[in-house]
Amino acid sequence: MQRTEPCRINFPVILKITLAVLALELLVFNFRHWESMGNREIKSYQITLGEGLVMQDDGSYLTGPGEKTIEFSNINRELKTLYLDVDVLENQESVNRAATLYQHARDDSNELEYWIPDRDIWHSQEKSRYLTYHFYGNCKSLKLTLALDDGVNFRLGYLLNPRIPMFFSLARVLALWCIGVFFYAFRPASRVYRVRYLECGRWKKVLVPGFLALHILGAGVLVHINPYFQDDRTEWSCQYQKLAEAFANGQVSLLQEPDQALIDMENPYDRAYRQKVMDETGQGFLWDHAYYEGKYYVYFGVVPEVLLYFPYYLLTHRQLHNRDAIFVMAAVFLIALMGVIHRILKRWFPKTSVGAWYLLSETTVLSCGLVYMCRRPDIYTVPILSALALGLLGFWCFLCANKEGGGLSAKLVAAGSLCTALVAGCRPQLFLIAAFSVILLRNYMFSYRYLKSREGRTCAFSFLLPMAAVALALMYYNYIRFGSIFNFGANYNLTMNDMRNRGLVADRIGLGIWAYFFAPVQLKLTFPFLAANSFDTNYLGTTIFESTYGGVFAISLFAWLCPALVIFRKHVEQRHKPLLFMAYAGMISAAVIAVLDAQVAGILLRYFGDFLFFIVFAAFLAWLLLFEKAKGSALEKPMLVFLLVCLAVAALYQGLQFFVDTGESLMDYRKDLFSTVKYQVMFWL
């Protein structure tokens, strides 16, 4: 492999891509314009307003009791298009809200009215005001019903059979141009695969910092994108903030005292009976808080509190927002991830190209659940992302602890041990991330000869001391709250079910494996094209579940590298065996965590964040191991193409899932953004 400049602009190709994108924009994405060029506006018809629409002196309309209908009758001509604008005058928020239009028509083949699919009209999106019809012959009448509340003042504009104007979208052109240039730059024959990541000259100083800067900036945008999460408005969302106040007052239970009705209950964890008692007494309780012996506690991991919320409260006397905590942890996660990737490539795959480095890094970031966690920055995300960030940081320290001449750095071992131990205080099940470090250090930590040496004893002490200190601190914290060193309090949660008696049931294992790994992606024909999976089961018991959008192997082509590695494991070189074992550890850990989540809590969309990274990291290692064997063979280019397709699939799924959620989705809370993207994508409307 020769050292070649990684970037040389091919202007003829760039010009071809530009012309192709412009042709697509003008001819394909605006085909409705060309299709309607022969339209002639219909001006001869009769219009009838329903009693729920009253015209005002200024020409506007006011809604009231009765049908809010607009009926165009005696058309008796071919009606191909309609222009309809509903401009609400009194409420500025309505600009970014759709006016739903219910439609019925009569034509040459239907003497009686028949239903036509509904359509949303956005005043802020001009393209949504144009509708294209496909009637049987001539249209006799068209009846439109506006879904508006009473007392709404609006202006109405309409044209029958207008020509649809050309909607040239610069944003769409730029997006398609970037996609085209990207695929050209990363085609298998590209020179980015002939330049080594570790030997890319002057580009080396900007590659990783630039990658990190862009992605950390992206994380910052995502945590602010949903207005619902910009205010910790609910009792259960501000638990870390309340715990900071409790710590400042020298106690581990929250300052708020439970109502007497809850204290007097024999079983306050019985949801239905608890709600009945609260309704009868007019009292309340704190949802999703741990309740034990007359006190409220926070069952979420305490480490984010100690590292972020409590210090921030002490220093500023203000509360740290969950959104900001997630941004900090997202930045730590990204920095640690890029550090881990760098060390792995430097140690085991020094000939990796800059092209493969980028595709692997980007695919890993897009596939590991980080995007979803950042755009849903609630309290439930904080311990999950904190555990992943600290676990990766610890693993990075352990990777750096290996000296080039042999042996370990005691300082880095201690740092890695501390970060890894703190994972248990964030999200206990994610402590399985320590398996990567155990495999990495096995030749040292399980070597009697090394442990006998002075360096070995120092490193062993450096490893064990932070682990023991954190473990003792967590055990003490658990004991003074719940009287048990191993109880973190999740089973005392006032939630959907009595988690003390939930138990471990073998029949729930299959449900969890199916939902988390193999459930198919459900598609629909309307934007954003992704539909929630229904969860029908014959399991005779309580199953806690919410909408999901496909299992891991349905949403991630990248994840299929895991079974591929198992099949072709014999082709892995001996020097790469530690990475093979790490990949196995990732797969096993993902399965164990998924089953535990299904057993202990249920099947929830946010729990994908618990195990996605493990299987994605295993896939990352699998590609490197398999590609190492494919180099120089006929499989080299197909492997690069496969990686490029994996990235495209990951990006596509993130785009599909971006506006949907189990609640508080961007489709509901950012209608302005939703409508803009919808009409950029659904150009055929």
Image: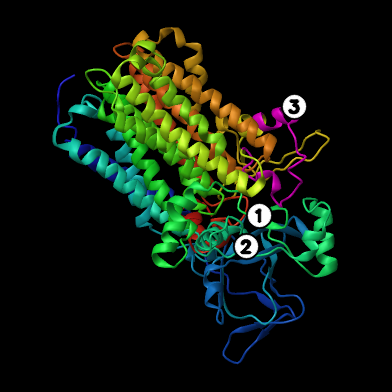
Q: Which residue is mark 1?
A: 289
- Which segment is the magenta one? 486-513
Query: How far apart are the alpha carbons under marks 2 and 1?
Result: 9 Å
Q: Which residue is mark 2?
A: 235
Q: Amino acid at mark 3?
A: Ala
Secondary structure of residue under mark 3: loop
Is residue 212 or residue 16 the one in the foreground? 212
Q: Which residue is mark 3?
A: 506
Q: Amino acid at mark 2?
A: Glu
Q: Is residue 620 left or right of residue 16?
A: right
- Specify whether residue 19 is in view: no
SS assignment for the magenta stretch, majority:
loop
Could you tell me residue 103's position as x and y percent?
69, 63
Q: In the figure, 354 relative to 137: above or below?
A: above
Q: In the figure, 516 relative to 261: above or below?
A: above
Sequence-wise first label, 2 or 3: 2
Mark 2 and mark 1 in contact? Answer it, CB < 8 Å.
yes
Is residue 535 or residue 193 the one in the foreground? 535
Circle 3 packing at 10 Å, graded few (<14), some (14-19), many (20+), is: few
Circle 2 packing at 10 Å, graded few (<14), some (14-19), many (20+), is: few
The quadrant of the rendering that contains the C terminus is: bottom right
Q: Is residue 632 left or right of residue 251?
A: left
Residue farthest toward the bottom in the current orientation of the protein: 57
Q: Does residue 490 show up magenta in the picture?
A: yes
